[in-house]
Amino acid sequence: MLLVVDDDVDAREFLVFILEQHGAIALASASTTEALERLEQFQPDVLLSDIEMPGEDRYNFIRRVRVLESSRIKQIPAIALTAYASNEDCNQALKAGFQRHIPKPVDPAELITILASLNADFDR
């Protein structure tokens, strides 16, 4: 199970579509508040999150995830999805707590390859 967090409805629906086409179960959240609730309820295997979310600085959401009480949730593999694609942006995302950084627009093949490297449960 994967959790997609993006405030842009088109981006969110596109990501869920890609994931479901590859056999994944994907839940979507439009806000970080909703995502935190879903993390507690469903404990997905991987988190995919836009880093530019309303009401959050670019890396605050993942920092909040990394300090949650549940050790399983705070250690969930996370992928930063972002229009900020420089090497510095990638380094900042990794330093904040993401395991991977994917620039937008997301290349579906690259996303699936990265998820496979994180051992996400889906068909390739």
Image (cartoon, rainbow, N blue to C red):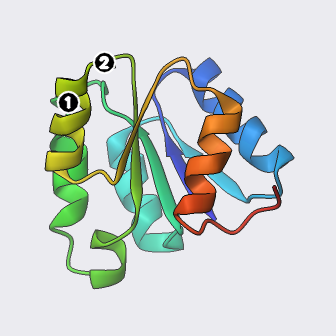
Dividing the image into 4 quarters, which one contains the N terminus?
A: bottom right
Taking the image as shown, residue 108 lies to the left or right of residue 100, namely right
Q: Is residue 123 above or below residue 9?
A: below
In the figure, 103 relative to 101: above or below?
A: above
Residue at the bottom extreme? 71
Q: Given contact means CB atoms under 8 Å apart, are the residues at marks 1 and 2 in contact?
A: yes
* Spot occupied by residue 107 in the image (x, y as percentages of width and height): 63, 26
> Image quarter for residue 120?
bottom right
Question: Is 103 on the left-hand or right-hand side of 62?
Answer: right
Q: Which residue is mark 1?
A: 58
**Please, what secondary structure does the residue beneath circle 1 have?**
loop
Q: Secondary structure at mark 2?
A: loop
**Residue 57 position (above or below residue 105):** below
Of pointers 1 and 2, the one earlier in the residue sequence:
1
Q: Position of residue 28 (x, y in %)?
A: 58, 45
- The image's mark for residue 84 is 2
Foreground residue among 37 and 98? 98
Q: Nearer the viewer, residue 2 or 40?
A: 2
Amino acid bearing label 2: Tyr
Q: Residue at x 55, y 17 (%)?
A: 105
